[in-house]
Amino acid sequence: MLTYIVGPPIRRPQDFYGRSREVARFFEIVAGKQTQSVSVLGVRRSGKTSFLQHVSNQEVMSRYIPNPRDYVMIYIDMTSCRTPNDFYQKLLVKLETRLSGTRPFNLWQSPDGQISLYDIETILCQHPHRRVILLLDEFDQIHTGSFGENFLIELRAMTGVLDYELAIVTASYWDLYQLGTHIGLPPTSPFYNIFYPTPIHLTGFGYNEAESLIRQPAAQAGIFYSETEVANIYALSGSLPFFLQAVAARWFDEKLFSEPPTFNTILGKIVLELAPYFEQWWRQLNECEQWLLMEVAENDLRTANPCTTVAVTDARRRLLAYGLLEPGANGLVINGTIFASWIKKYGTVALEKLDVKPETINSVALRRKLIDLFNSEEVRTICFDLQINYDDLRGESRADKIRELILAMQARPDGLQRLLDVIRAERGEII
């Protein structure tokens, strides 16, 4: 019998540990007098999929909602959608399945391959007394497909119709502003206004929650941990549930089939096993976040700080929100000895790249060059190559548009370098 679930999403409420505060917050937002949309944020393996499946379980819903049958939770994994039509097709099928039998669907529909927002609204308008909650998992994957700003605008439009009730729950690593900017949505877009202003971060467990996750599965198999063993597992894994499960499962196996486990023997065996997950995190972090984690892990970092004070402050805030850093007795600490050990051993390789930047781009000089050397039509062409709508840039004059273009590209990962590459492709090494 498997004692710990390590890897796949948690499907049964009895196997779901912790997150009581986050679950209660979720239902406060989506099940209030007027439904609201919300963003759920977390790093890879923080339990986003398990969280969405947990809150959509009828048994769980009945604990928080007096009338759960009035709610329709629709889960869609966005990694399976490459285009808006893919998304609308999946949503249409799920709505028809969940709402069938309550009213007939003798309505005209677009042919396959042309399903759109209007087909979805046709169904939703037939059920004005049901509250539909779209659970969109891996939402940041839309930046890899054929999704653009119009898709987000359409999602926003669906939540504002008075003929039915609909809310959107997105689960992602990227926050919505970062994602919107990446696909060309202006930061002033009303899309962001439909979401509750504070996202639900899936950070680490508190000690009591972690202790339950460590002890209870093992106890069901007749294995009981001492206080010291629980403390060692927690110190090794950190507070994120996937790593708690992984370390507790390894401790269980060693205790049952091998020599009595110790802190150091488990540490030596499991760092490399979990390395692929840490590498996923590392690739998603920006250079300031990587540098800050290295500084906390090493405490004597020799590499110069590559970031401004504001950037370091923002990196600290994000790392705390995602649970990669945690407050300690004497300042910030890495969440888990295993992650800290990986950073010390392997993070340096990635960090050394920070000292070899391709070039420093002076945004002021870049703006002046664009004003001096490019007319309005040429700036439009640059915007087209960068998938930015020229007319959405604020201001009336060409200089205004150029300033806003540079600001928009500064907000994207490697955005200024991409802008420079496009300019040089047109005119050569003028900058």
Image (cartoon, rainbow, N blue to C red):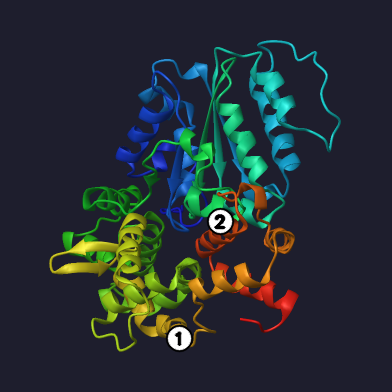
Is residue 349 left or right of 231 when viewed as pictured?
A: right
Using the image, tell me which numbered label, if any, was put on residue 349.
1
Q: Is residue 180 positioned above or below 425 on the image?
A: above
Using the image, tell me which numbered label, if any, was put on residue 61.
none
Q: Nearer the viewer, residue 46 or 372?
A: 372
Is residue 177 left or right of 17 when viewed as pictured?
A: right
**Mark 1 crowdedness (10 Å alpha carbons): few <14, some 14-19, many ≥20:** few
Q: Is residue 359 positioned above or below 288 on the image?
A: below
Q: Position of residue 191 (x, y in %)?
A: 54, 38
Which quarter of the figure has residue 429?
A: bottom right
Q: Is residue 152 positioned above or below 336 on the image?
A: above
Residue drawn 24% across and 58% down? 225
Q: Is residue 407 visible?
A: yes
Instruction: Specify the quadrant that holds the C terminus.
Output: bottom right
Q: Nearer the viewer, residue 369 or 178?
A: 369
Residue farthest to the right, as pictured: 111
Residue under numbered circle 2 = 400
Is residue 4 left or right of 218 when viewed as pictured?
A: right
CA gap between label 1 and label 2 equals 41 Å
**Mark 2 is on which residue type?**
Asp
Q: Nearer the viewer, residue 150 or 397?
A: 397
Q: Position of residue 112 (x, y in %)?
A: 84, 34
Q: Secondary structure at mark 2?
A: helix
Which quarter of the figure has residue 121?
A: top right
**Mark 1 is on which residue type?**
Val
Residue drawn 62% across and 47% down? 392
Q: Nearer the viewer, mark 1 or mark 2?
A: 2
Q: Is residue 138 visible?
A: no
Q: Earlier in the sequence, mark 1 or mark 2?
A: 1
